[in-house]
Amino acid sequence: MALPRDASAQSQRIYVRSIPDRATFENYSRVLGSDRFGKFIIDIKTDEIYFIDVNVFKIHADFVLGVLLKQAWTADNIREYNKNYKRVKPRFILGYITEHLKVDKMSFAFWEGDKIDAKGVERVYKKLKKTFYKKELLFRPDSPSQERVAKAVARKNIKTITNDALYKSAPYQAFNKGSSVGTLRVVPRNTPYESLVFERDDIVLLQESYPDISPVSGIMSTVFSTPLSHVNLRATAWGIPNAGYRNANVDYNELNGKVVYYEVGDREHVLRLATNIEIASYERQRKQRRTVAVPPADLETANMPMLTALRAGHARTYGSKTANLGEIASAGLSKVNIPKGFGLPFFYYQRHLKKNGLDQIVRSILSDPKIKSDARYRKNALATLREQILSAPMDDEVLDAIYKRVRLKLGGGGVFVRSSTNAEDLPGFNGAGLYDTVPNVRGKKNLETAVKTVWASLWNYRAFEERDLFGIDHKQVHAGVLIQTGVNATAAGVLITTNLYNPEDDNSFTINAKSGLGMRVVEGTKIPEQIIFDTANDGTKIISRSDDPYMLVFDSKGGIQEVENPHRGVILTEERAKRLANAVQSFAPLFSSRHALDVEWLLEGETVWIVQARPYVESR
């Protein structure tokens, strides 16, 4: 390709040497999500700047090699090109200009793996001041190393803004796009989580952060979280609109109790009275109910095998969580650490029910017509059932065998007692977070209570409601238990093997992290640290930093306690993120490539532990 003159470039929309006005910027940029972004290249030798058409050139390298250098796309040429991301750049500075549409700010930035120094940032700033129409440009560091550079840049009177500040200051965040019709229910502030009861055609306006929610038709929150909180995962699984809007309680309180139309887009939303046509259309859609089949359970096997003896195919005996982790543990991968553990099969749950006559109570509940028609009655009945499962004594012989295995195989210290059912990780039904985990269990009596707590959680209200939404037969659902050595994590989180913020990015993982144990990462009550890790180039892009002043740690007597968080800085350094990503990449091939993976991980000092892997939740 011959290097075009500016005039022909303008007509061909390849590049321009300056952006004199907004119209030109719009021609050479594009909108992705809630941002409009453009790209520029500065030739260090000539001091020329090129604002390239991002609709023509997907990446900087396409323009540099194809237009400026006229070189073939070879490994050697790419290797030379990549040197421009080092601190000392041989030829080019490669950057982005982003208009943050939700907060009306404009920033310039560099790929998170770029090691640009303060001198380079200052050079870019001065060049953009001469060639870009918007003079109030902010430097936006994308990585931990660039955050350090930002401190030096600020001393040069160049204003900066972080992704963390942008994320937390935005008045609106779209978590799951779509539209729905339902009755708006404004939940008053300080409403206890335990008292929440919703109908499935409700559109709820939440003014507190809640750890979970039962099925509804739409969610709007005045308090923001992240895409990986349980409430947001629920919305994704149900295929309902879900957004955060800080002023929702003021703007929409008058619609409380009325049937509304709700639509969520990247940058804006609609919430208004629904028309008769919209109501009728929604009712037709509701009748097209989807049914998820639960694989037949093996209720005869009584063995308690270690994870290293299990495979994914054992899910029908031990549940998906145990079987998936066994698939990884049995592979013997050097980069993957998994806490020792063993599985309790469905056999013992079923035995506990039958011995105590609880199987008859379950059948009675499921055949009661009022259970289907009255949500509050249903919630109370399920709470009573859970209490009965907990109060019923466990068979002494079974408890002795479990406790002996904890002492001999897991060292006798604190253990995690985790749920593992046959009603999760199914095609069309993820089931993440529906059932309970009991942390740092110590002693025989506490072990009995913990196992029964996990069994009882099969009948959690939120679990029952979600299974019912997807047409799952409750009579076919069974509870297994995974018992693992407890890891007193210094940090924990969730990793998804895709970029949730940019669906066009094929190489990056989304990672959430918090200090201490991982229970709060998905509760959504505080914003965790969020990063995007580029596995192709080991780049770490910061989305938000954790602002939680407290963390959860083991109590020496058993259970957990909340303490002040001494780790208020960066949780996932670039080295830690890389080590975590490498571990996940090593076992990802064990699972179907059709779905992204949802991975729970722990950090103990500098050691990464994997404690769960499952298909990432998908919209129905």
Image (cartoon, rainbow, N blue to C red):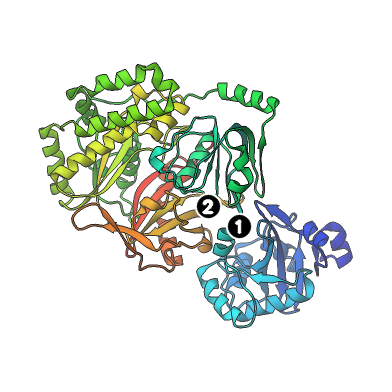
In the rendered view, would you say 117 is above or below 17? below
Residue 224, labelled with which disc?
A: 2
Q: Residues within 10 Å of mark 2 (few under 14, many from 20)?
A: many
Q: Position of residue 36 (x, y in %)?
A: 70, 57
Q: How many marks?
A: 2
Residue farthest to the right, as pictured = 7
Q: Position of residue 397 (x, y in %)?
A: 10, 33
Q: Position of residue 458 (x, y in %)?
A: 32, 32
The disc labelled 1 sits on which kind of residue?
A: Ala
Residue 170, labelled with which disc?
A: 1
Q: Is residue 200 left or right of residue 31?
A: left
Q: Is residue 311 left or right of residue 180?
A: left
Q: Are marks 2 and 1 in contact (CB under 8 Å)?
A: yes
**Quarter the N terminus occupies:** bottom right
The disc labelled 2 sits on which kind of residue?
A: Phe
Q: Is residue 444 visible?
A: yes
**In what element is the residue under mark 1?**
loop
Residue 13, labelled with which disc?
A: none
**In what element is the residue under mark 2?**
loop
Q: Is residue 330 left or right of residue 545?
A: left
Residue at left 50%, top 69%? 144
Q: Nearer the viewer, residue 495 or 524?
A: 524
